[in-house]
Amino acid sequence: MEMLRRMILEKGRIIGDDILKTDSFLNHQIDPVLMDAIGQAFYHRFCDHGITKILTVEASGIAVAGATARLFGVPYIFAKKQNACNLDNEIYTSEIYSFTKKTTCTIRVAKEYLQSQDRVLVLDDFLANGQALLGLIEICKKAGATVLGCGIVIEKAFQGGAKKVEEKGIEVFSLVRIGRFENAKPVFL
Ligand code: G4P
């Protein structure tokens, strides 16, 4: 993912010790050419896995999941963070704690969209401590669905999230892995 690395170096900004701001192309304004390339990269890695659903969490994961799901030709689901009156009691939930935001939130997926025969690819834009992925995996487990792998756009490897997921026997495929920040620049692994 040369394009992604280049955009991170040219347009990313480092905030504090461990946050990489990518609002100009990934998290707020979205670059559609980059998004297509991200979808293709995940498709090439997982196209022979018999994926039937793609699962992510709002908000930034949605664009990534959409670009990828179009290539797989399968629906994508985003777990919701807000409780809504149209999400009835037939939902799977998981509690996720964000070390970045220091808040806990409940994520929710309607039971009718995730079933035991589903073969799921879990996607997200950032992987830090792994709490979002673990929450999504827990929801799949509650549904009896099989998680075939996780795809991440930017993994901050120094925060240990991938290890927690891999300990569950689930592959984490990251398009770029950042080992550390040095002189206000990310150092790729
Ligand atoms: P974790 O899921 O890996 O444990 O990450 P953590 O809770 O620490 O992160 C919480 C939120 O912050 C997540 O977004 C995650 O994608 C995002 N995040 C973590 N590190 C970075 C970073 O360095 N840069 C950017 N841009 N985002 C980061 P979220 O709560 O799912 O919200 P949303 O941004 O998708 O709406």
Image (spheres, grey):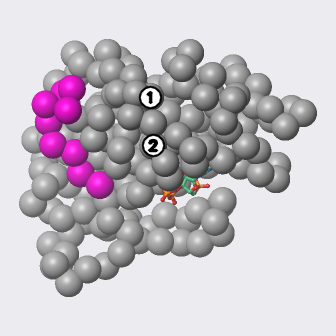
| Left or right: 50, with 187 as reference point | left
Q: Is the CB atom of the residue marked by disc 2 within 8 angstroms of ligand 1's nearest atom?
A: no
Q: Is residue 180 visible?
A: yes
Is 49 on the left-hand or right-hand side of 170?
left
Point out the image quarter for the C terminus. Answer: top right
Using the image, tell me which numbered label, if any, was put on residue 34: 1
How far is disc 2 from disc 1 in space, using C-alphas?
Answer: 8 Å
Q: Residue 122 is drawn in which quadrant?
A: top left
Give the numbered dot on residue 177: none
Question: Residue at 41% across / 57% down in the picture?
Answer: 59
> Residue 52, located in which quarter of the rendered image?
top left
Q: Is residue 94 above or below residue 20?
A: below
> In the figure, is residue 86 to the left or right of 35?
left
Identify which residue is drawn at 15% across, 62% down.
111
Q: Residues within 10 Å of mark 1 (few under 14, many from 20)?
A: some
Residue 109 image offset from top left, x and y in percent: 25, 62
Q: Residues within 10 Å of mark 2 (few under 14, many from 20)?
A: some
Q: Kindly check if marks 2 and 1 are in contact, taking CB atoms under 8 A apart as contact.
A: yes
User: Which residue range is magenta in the image?
Assistant: 70-78
Q: Which image quadrant is residue 10 in?
A: top right
Can you identify the residue that label 2 sits on?
A: 30
Amino acid bearing label 1: Leu
Question: x%, y% of residue 87?
Answer: 19, 75
Residue at the extreme right of the image, as rendered: 183
| Residue type, numbered disc 2 | Ile
